[in-house]
Image: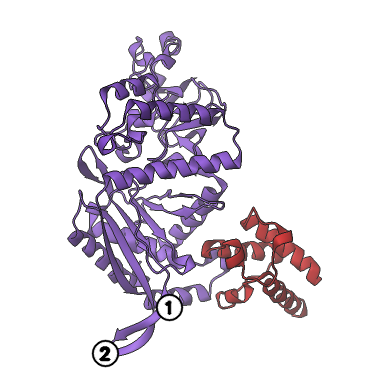
């Protein structure tokens, strides 16, 4: 899966949690918590939605690595690549 | 029109989910009503048969207490259906706030019941169906009371500008104008947002006017609970993890068992303890405003059950779809502003509840353990109590219990 495709699907997934999200105003390197008022319940729901979308179950210890859109894309790209290699 | 929360004065019928002639069980969702805060699934508070729908879905905002439908009681439903039961309701709209509907006055075998829970409480759920502040809100001039009755406005919901908050004739007229204006306003998101602010304003102003709050705070070492949670979550799939708020809800609910005077309502100049502990969870809505629907029997649920219930509640609250029991049942409010670095909060009690529990953000701070200063995640827990019902001493016992319970997270 290309990075662009991952990014598109991450943003689509996020908009399910944050319905008023405007992708044009999304800053890919700024924390989701700060720019979208995402709380811990929203974030957990986001991880659950990512799991459904990509089949990647983010362990609790890695949850902190998905704080921004850029970080999510990098993390998922790596996770998907590792999965196809296995 | 049931009162779905202390701050509700009017609502719209959005849809009927049962048809006349259909059998209804207590707890069945029979209609959807739009309040200023959400679309609420209205649950039946009786068993019976839906006899007649009095108000079809429309954009009209109806005052709380307006009969929406007639439900024939269980006994009469099983009896050979007599003609008068269905013929009688014709003059119903003339007396919308009456407990005894025209159907009941007719020679039907058993009275029908108007769907107006606040005026027709069932013994099993008095809390849910109590008129908000019926007893203590007597400060209204006779002329104003008469006019309010004519306009079908509930005096308890009116903001008074007279001496000592007395509701004057002018207040009633203003409120009537407000209701009319709101009914005419286009139902845009902005209008809805405005109504939500008004609803919150009414409830919070009433709370500050009537409830003599006392405030207590304590600092809890949250380290053990967070460590336990991290370990528990570590091996679990993302769908089975807990967030720490669930521990706070459970600990608060269990602590309320120990200090039950904080759990219930202030009605008619008396505190009424509730045996059931229905935790109203403050949930902020995107775009502003908040609701505090109930997690029922929070003390009896496992952490996993509470987590699932909490997730579902947040989802539906933010989608604007709650059940009537959820918005009317809370016996206490729990709020956590912990997400945004707030150290402590001193909340305003949701009338007619007796207390509000508040939690701040767990923050790493120096803490003394066994004579040594070490860094620990500390959590501020606060209690706002109604001093008419309880004193600070009981409140202090509650916070002590919350602290103690959070030191044994595995037992929650």
In this orientation, which residue lies closer to the viewer: B266 or B141?
A: B141
Q: Are marks 2 and 1 in contact (CB under 8 Å)?
A: no
Q: Colour of chain A?
A: red
* Image label count: 2
Q: Does residue B191 appear left or right of residue B145 in this picture?
A: right
Which quadrant is home to the N terminus of chain B? top left
Quick check: A4 above or below B354? Answer: below
- Identify the residue at horizontal 38%, vertical 64% (top origin): B359
Q: Does residue B116 appear left or right of residue A34 in this picture?
A: left
Which quadrant is home to the C terminus of chain B? bottom left
Provide residue A9's location: percent of width, then percent of height.
74, 62
Q: Earlier in the sequence, mark 2 or mark 1?
A: 1
Q: Secondary structure at mark 1?
A: helix
In this orientation, which residue lies closer to the viewer: B305 or B14?
A: B14
Label 1 packing within 10 angstroms: few (<14), some (14-19), many (20+):
few
Residue corresponding to mark 1: B227
Provide residue B235's location: percent of width, then percent of height.
53, 75
- Identify the residue at horizontal 39%, vertical 50% (top origin): B296
Quick check: B386 above or below B143? Answer: below
Q: Secondary structure at mark 2?
A: loop
Q: Colour of chain B?
A: purple
Q: Residue B47 is drawn in which quadrant? A: top left
Q: What chain is tagged by disc 1?
A: B
- Identify the residue at horizontal 64%, vertical 53% (top origin): A19
The numbered mark at residue B371 is 2
């Amino acid at each position: 899966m290309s990075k662009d495709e991952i990014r598109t699907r991450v943003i689509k997934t996020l908009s399910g949690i944050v319905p008023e999200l405007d992708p044009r105003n999304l800053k890919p390197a700024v924390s989701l918590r700060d720019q979208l008022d995402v709380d811990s319940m929203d974030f957990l729901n986001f991880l659950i939605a990512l799991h459904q979308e990509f089949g990647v179950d983010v362990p609790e210890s890695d949850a902190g690595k998905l704080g921004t859109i850029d970080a999510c894309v990098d993390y998922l790209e790596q996770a998907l690549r590792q999965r196809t290699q296995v | 029109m049931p009162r779905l929360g202390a701050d509700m004065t009017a609502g719209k019928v959005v849809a009927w989910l049962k048809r006349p002639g259909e059998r209804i069980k207590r707890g069945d969702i029979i209609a959807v009503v739009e309040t200023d805060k959400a679309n609420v699934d209205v649950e039946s508070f009786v068993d019976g048969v839906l006899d007649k729908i009095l108000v079809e879905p429309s954009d009209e905002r109806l005052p709380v207490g307006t009969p929406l439908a007639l439900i024939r009681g269980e006994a009469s439903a099983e009896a050979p259906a007599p003609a008068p039961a269905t013929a009688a309701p014709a003059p119903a709209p003339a007396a919308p706030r009456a407990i005894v509907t025209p159907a009941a006055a007719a020679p039907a075998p058993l009275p029908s019941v108007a769907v107006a829970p606040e005026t027709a409480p069932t013994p099993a759920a008095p809390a849910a169906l109590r008129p908000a502040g019926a007893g203590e809100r007597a400060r209204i001039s006779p002329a104003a009371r008469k006019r309010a009755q004519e306009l079908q406005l509930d005096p308890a919901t009116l903001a008074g500008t007279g001496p000592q908050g007395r509701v004057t004739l002018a207040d009633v007229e203003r409120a009537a104008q407000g209701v009319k204006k709101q009914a005419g306003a286009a139902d845009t998101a902005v209008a809805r947002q405005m109504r939500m602010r008004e609803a919150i304003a009414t409830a919070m102003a009433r709370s500050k006017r009537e409830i003599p709050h006392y405030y207590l705070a304590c600092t809890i070492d949250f380290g053990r609970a967070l460590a336990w949670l991290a370990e528990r979550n570590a091996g679990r799939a993302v769908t089975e993890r807990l967030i720490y708020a669930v521990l706070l809800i459970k600990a608060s609910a269990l602590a309320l068992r120990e200090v039950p005077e904080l759990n219930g309502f202030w009605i008619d100049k008396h505190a009424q303890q509730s045996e059931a502990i229905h935790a109203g969870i403050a949930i902020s809505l995107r775009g502003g405003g908040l609701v505090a629907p109930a997690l029922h029997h929070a003390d009896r649920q496992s952490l996993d059950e509470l987590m699932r219930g909490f997730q579902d509640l947040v989802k539906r609250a933010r989608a604007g779809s709650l059940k009537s029991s959820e918005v009317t049942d809370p016996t206490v409010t729990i709020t956590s502003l912990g997400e945004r670095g707030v150290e402590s909060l001193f909340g305003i009690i949701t009338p007619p509840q007796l207390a509000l529990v508040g939690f701040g953000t767990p923050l790493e701070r120096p803490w003394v353990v066994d004579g040594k200063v070490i860094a620990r995640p500390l959590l501020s827990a606060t209690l706002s109590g109604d001093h008419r019902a309880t004193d600070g001493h009981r409140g202090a016992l509650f916070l002590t219990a919350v602290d103690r319970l959070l030191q044994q997270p595995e037992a929650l």
